[in-house]
Image (tube, rainbow, N blue to C red):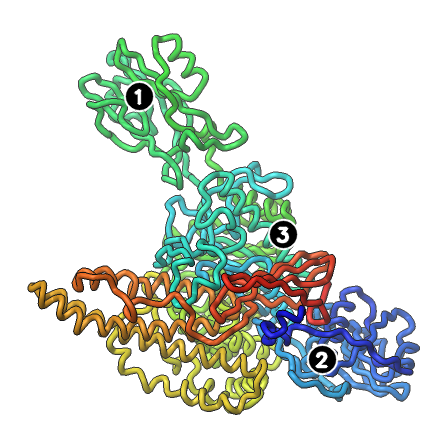
Amino acid sequence: IKSSTMQTFSAFSALVWIFARFPAEAKPPGIVWYQKQQHLFAAKEIRRYVYHTTKQWLHLHNSNDSLSDLLKTQDKAIVLHEHDPALTDRLSLGFRIRQKMGEQSYLLKTTHLHESTQLFAIGADSTGVLYAAYAIAEKFGIRFRLYGDIIPETTSEFCLPDVDEFSEPTFEIRGLQPFHDFPEGPDWWGENEYKAVTTQISKQKMNFIGLHTYPYDPTPGTGRDEPTVWVGLKNDVNDDGTVKNSYPTSYANTMRNQWGYTALPTGNYSYGASRIFDTDCYGNPVQVGNCPLPTTPEGYNAVFDKTGIMLKNSFEHAQSLNVKTCVGTETSLSTPMSPIASLNLYYSKTRQDNFLTTTECAECENLYEFVRVEGFVYAHPFPESVALNTYYNGQLQDNVLSVKPPAEGYVLVRTEGYAFSNSTRLSGNVTTTLLMYYNADIHDHLSVSTPEGEAYAKTHGYTLVGSVANVLANGTVSTPKEYYEGIFMRIQKLGIPLDYYWIWTPEGWDGGMTSTNPVFKAAVDDLASAGQAHAAVNASFKLATCGWVVGPLPDRSIFDRVLSSDYSAITSIDMHVGNSPVDPAYVNITKHDKWAIPWMEDDPGLTAPELWVNRTLMHMEDAKKYGCQGLLGIHWRTVQTSPQIAAMAQKSWNFGLTSNDFWKSWSIDEFGIPDPATVFAAVESFNLPRPVNWGGGPGAFAGNIAQCTWGSKYDFVDTLASMKSKVKPGSCLDRFEYWLNSFQYMRGISRTECAWGQYNAAIKKVGKESDPATRQRMAETLALPLREQLVQNATEMMTYLLQTVSSTGEMGTIMNVLSHSLVHAIDEPAAQLESYLGRALTGKAVPSRAYAGPTKLAVPTVRSVVTKGESCCFVLLYCAECFFVQQEYDRHRLSYFITFKNSLIFQEVIVLLTPLVLFI
C-alpha cells in the first residue's frame, strides 16, 4: 500500500498479506493429490488455509503411481484420494478403508508411515474429496459462513491433527433458496455476489442453489415480470441464446414502486445513507442503463440477455465447486401477451359501412357479412400497449376501429383488444401495420392491415388517413408446451449449466386450494406440458416441483401420484412463513424424491434481526423423519441469516447437533468467548422481539404507542453490550459489534415506532383545533417537540443500521427502511406540520444528511475463489463521512486498484494478491 494511504487503510490491513520465502527443508511438509485435476483445487484450498493459520507453506505433489515413494520424502503429508479399498494393501496403511462409501462422504485418518505422519483425506467421489479438504481446514481453526471465512488472528505451529473420522450427509441435497423479490435478497446480486455465495455454500459442505421467478403478467405491478427466467417461443431465441422479443422486466431497485416502496433516488437519502450508493437508481448490475425499468424492446431484451450471461457465469462457477443449480417459474405458466383475438372485417352493403371487430358481430342483425381477418390483437393490455377501440357514429352509421375517436360525434362502443404502438414493431414480420382509410362520399372509415384490404381501399375511393397501430400478422395461439420449449431451448443455447428446473405452485394455494378445483387440473396439465417440452428439446436438466404447499388439499401428496417420472423431486417451502411444522404429507411421497425448505427468515420481519436456529434444527428432524432426501433454506439476507444457515449445514453432517451446542461453538468461533451464547440462545426463535411486520411489503414500521412499553424486552441488548470488553480487538470485535449494532438498531425501531405513534396522536389533536392561532401554538408546543424526538430516534436507529452494512442485504434494508417506512413516518408528514406552524421545519426537526457514527470500512461482497482470467469488480464502503468506493481487479497485474472519492479525498492504492484469493 502506498505510504500516503497507510493510515487510511489500517482497518483494511487484515486483507493484505505479504509474500514470504519459505526455508528449504530436508523433508518439507506437503500435500499429495491423486487421480483427478479437481483434486488440485482441493489441495490448494488446504494449502492456503494451513498458511493462514500456521504460516507453513505446503508443497503440492501430483502422484499417480509413485504415491508410496512420495510419502517417504514428506515429513508431514496430507494425502487427497478418492475411494479405493485397494489403497490399504498397496501402501500398507495399517487401517482398512470401507468397501463402500456413500456419495459425498469422506474419511479423515491420521497414519504414521515411513517414520513420518500422514493425514489421509479419502472422499467417496470428487465432491467428497473437496469436503474432506474443508474439514481439514476446520481442523486448523478455520470456520466457514455464508458471508465469508473466519480465520484465527493468531497462528500456531504446523502440526497434523490426530483424527479418525468418517462423515456422510443426512440429506443428499443441501443448500439454499435465495428468494427473488426484495432488495435485501438476490435481486441485488450480480455475478460477484452469486459466486461468493456459491463458494461459501460449497465450503459449508452444501451442494444446491435454487431460484424462484415471479412470472410474466400483462399488467405491471408487484411480484411479476422478473428476468431470471425468460418466457417466450423457440423462434424468438437467437443461436447464441440471446432473445429477439421479450417484455418489460426488472429486479427491485430504489426507483421502482413495488412491494409498498416509494421510489426515492438514493441521493435524497438522509442520515448519511446516500453516501454508500453510487447511483440514484440503485439495483442489480444487469439493469445498468435500464433502471428502474427498460422502456424499449431493445431494453427489454438487454436486461434478459445480461441476466442470462450473469447466471451462466455464476452457475459455471457453482458447478465447478460441485454446487447444483436450479431456476424455475410458477404454474400455470403465464405467457407474454396472450390469448390472441382476430380482427374480423365485416361489411354492410345497405349501410356502406366496414366494421372491424374481435367479436363474431352478434349485433350486426344480419346486415353485415364477413370479409376477411385483418390481423390479430391481444386480449389483455401489456406495457406500452395501445387499446384498439370501436367507435360508432349513429347519424352516419359508421363504425371505426381506432385508438381515439376520429371526429366529434363518435362514441366508444368497446375495447376490441390491445396492440403495439406505431413506434413498436417486432422483428421477423411478427407485426404488420393497421392503416386507417376514409371515404368521404359514403362517410365510411376502413382499417386494414392486409394487402387485400389495402388494394380494396385504393380501388374504392378511400384515402389514407394514417397508421393506427402495429397488430400481429399471425394469430396462431402457442401452447404451454411450445412456451416451455422456448424457455428450455434458450437455457441450453445460452449454455447455462442447470441441474434442475422447478415449477412452483402459486402462493395462493396455501389458502386452501383443493384437488377438485379446476385450477389444480390446469396446473397438472401445465406440468405435463413442461414434461413434454423437456423431452422434445432433450433438456439436460431434471424437472421438479416447488411452491408454498407440497400439494392441494385434502391429500397434499397427490403430486406423487399424478406426476410422471419426468419429475425428479417434489418440494415446498414450509407453510405460514415457516411457523408451521414440516408437512407430514411428505411421508406419503414414495415415487419421487422430496425436499423440505424451512425458512431461515421471513419477509414480514425482514428489516429486523431474525434468529431461527432452534426452529430450523427441529424442522430438519421432521424432514428426516418423513424421509426427505433434500433440505434447503429459504432466505434473503446473507449475514443476518448466517447463524441458522451454519446450523443447518452442520446438522446435515452431525445430526445430533442441538441449538445450545451450536450457540456455544458459534459464539467462540465468532467472538472468541463463550459468554454471548447465553444471550443468543435465550432470545432466538419466537423469543426475539418482533417490532416490524408486513405492511404492503416486507418489514414495515408502524406508529405504535404500545412500543413505548417494550423497553424490558430489549434488556438482552444491554447484557450483550456488557460482554464487549471481553472481546479482543480485531475481527472478533468486528463481528461482535455487527450483532450488537443489529440489536441496538432493532431496539431503535421500537423507539422510533413509539415516537411515531406519539407524534401521530399529537398531530391529530392539533388538526382538530379550529382556531388558527391556537392550532399554531399547539403545533409549536405539542407536535414539534415530538417531531424532534421522532427524528432523533430515527437518526440513532439509522446510525446503528449503517454500522451493520457488510453486504448487499444490509444495503437493501436501508432502502426498505427509508422508502417503505421512514418516508411515511418523517418525510411525508413534514408538510402538514409546516402548514400548522406557518413556517418550514428546521434544526432538530429535519433529518441530517450526515452520517453520525464511527469510521467504518466494509466489503459487501467477499470473494475468496476467482476463476483464472476472470475480471472482477468489488465494492468497498468507507464510512467516516460515508462515501462510495470502487475496487477493480486487474487480472494481468494480479493486483487491486482501489479508488476513494469524495470532496476531500482522491487516493489510489494497490493491494497485491496473495493466498487470500485462490484461482481455479
Find residue 759 and report its horizontal and vertical position in percent. Answer: 22, 71
- Please report the residue visible at 57 percent of the width from the left and 88 percent of the height from the top: 728
Foreground pick, 367 / 330: 330
Tell me if residue 290 comes above or below residue 805 in the rendering: above
- The amino acid sitting under disc 2 is Ile
- The amino acid sitting under disc 1 is Phe
Which of the numbered marks, if any, corresponds to residue 96? none
| Residue pointed to by mark 2 | 136
Which of the numbered marks, if any, corresponds to residue 496? 3
| Residue pointed to by mark 1 | 355
Tell me if residue 739 comes above or below residue 35 in the rendering: below
Find residue 192 and report its horizontal and vertical position in percent. Answer: 60, 60
Q: Is residue 565 visible in the rendered structure shown here?
A: no
Using residue 646 as the reference point, say whether residue 361 is left or right of it.
left
Disc 1 versus disc 2: distance between alpha carbons?
A: 79 Å
Quadrant location of the N terminus in the rendered image: bottom right
- Please report the residue visible at 45 percent of the width from the left and 87 percent of the height from the top: 720
Q: Secondary structure at mark 2?
A: helix
Q: Quadrant of residue 252?
A: bottom left
Find residue 712 and report its horizontal and vertical position in percent. Answer: 33, 87
Q: Quadrant of residue 650?
A: bottom right
